[in-house]
Image: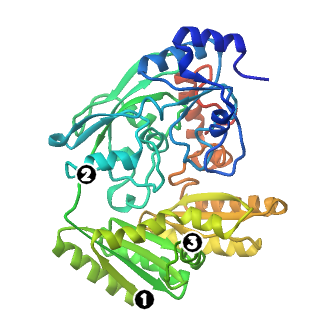
Amino acid sequence: MKALLENQLDELKAYIGEEKFSQNPSELATHARDESAHGEFPPDVVFYPETTEDISKLLKYCNEHKIPVTPWGAGTSLEANPVAIRGGVSLDVSKKMNQVLDIRPQDFQVTVQPGVILQDLNEKLSKHGLFFPPDPGAPCSIGGMVGNNAAGIQAVKYGPTKQYVLNMEIVMANGDIIHCGTNAMRTSSGYDLLHLFIGSEGTLGVFTEITLKLAGIPPDVSAATASFETMQQASQTVVNLVQAGLSPAALEFMDDVTVRDINAFKGMSLPETSTLFLEFRGNKAEVNEDVKLAQEICDENGCINYHAVTGREERDKLWEARHHMAYAAASANPGKRFVALDVAASISKFPEIVDKSRSTLEKYNLVGPIFGHAGDGNLHVVIFYAEDEIDQVKKANDEIVNHTLDAGGTATGEHGVGIGKIHFMQKEHGQSYELMKQIKHLFDPNGILNPGKIFED
């Protein structure tokens, strides 16, 4: 049964504009899934708003008729976060609400619409010597990054998206338009509603304008790879590097499977052992000193190959390989589906979580790369499987996540809850999970905003 009836769609077209809606089969199919393996859920219609008022009108109508609305940015998420699993309207901001509205270099700020793509934004900002630091790697939208509180490879130095959002214009479930935050760099005024929306995955409101804090592009950059004979040596080196007070712009861990897949996919010749990717930014003297100290720590932990590169061109080759990790792993496992874990724990627990992940895959005779943003304790485990292995995959997934939760960590460091992490929410949050449900009901009493995500319904 469709969530949106034909007569209701006709009313919406007359109310907002027929040209803003599409039921083209190819567009419905495009919006039926993201980059995860969670299956396909086509919406009843795709809506392409041009203004905040368009979204306000849509939500007002859909709220009155209890029609689901699911925001869509670039579709690069990994937990079906933007997929309309209950049908209804897929609200796509990528075509018409994708403008950089105002760059203010003197304030280190920019205001954008939610459909702006990260790489496009940073290209425009680079002309002013500025950039937006969170970098998940994929060509994701700013609205999606805010909705998931995205982090990425530079989070160890710069932090996640929530640290850069200053204020937002938001349309509530009933169509009301509100503003949260301020252009001031700090405020103590009232409740911090702004950060309540960040990471809410479109379940509390729809972002229409976002003002971000920016950082200056550092003058010098250096990257390095450090290879180790064992995963234990590599993961313990991560702890030692952080505890030494180094502040790398990136500190990535990759097991031997990950490196093997990258070599095959990108034609590289990295030693196929557990490896760290490091990057340092700053002035030349600072960068050189950090690179030297990092090598000393790596050598103390049994590093068998430390290779430093200077300059952005060589650095970019390394990080291009890292950003293509998902494609490299998929290429190495043709015809298989996958489950992507993104657990995170305190830095001292990182080696333990790495060991648990590898032993669990071996226990269930499963394959897949183990890698992550090690500098802030975020680990990814991508399990590839054939259809007859799904039971083992579920058991392995649950064991790794539950072990991480028992160690004081989280079920998701950056991918969000979506539909894949819902069954861990009660254990992770306890009684506060019930408070989250109350907040959801207060903001969206009819449950129209991205239903089926974060909460079971």
Mark 1 or 2: in front is 2
Please tell me which residue lies in front, 268 or 71.
268
In the picture of the structure, the residue carrying the numbered disc 3 is 265
Tell me the crowding category of disc 2: few under 14, some 14 to 19, or many 20 or more residues within 10 angstroms, Cα based. few
Q: Earlier in the sequence, mark 3 or mark 2?
A: 2
Give above or below for 46 relative to 272. Answer: above
The percent position of residue 211, horizontal first and vertical second, equals: 31, 35
Q: Amino acid at mark 1?
A: Asn
**Which mark lies nearer to you, 1 or 3?**
3
Q: What percent of the width, then of the height, locates residue 269?
A: 50, 83
Q: Which mark is residue 305?
A: 1
Q: Residue furthest right?
A: 388
Residue 316 spot, x, y in % from top left? 37, 67
Where is the C terminus found, in terms of image quarters? top right
CA–CA distance between discs 3 and 2? 30 Å
Q: Mark 2 = which residue?
A: 126
Pointers 1 and 3 in contact (CB under 8 A)?
Answer: no
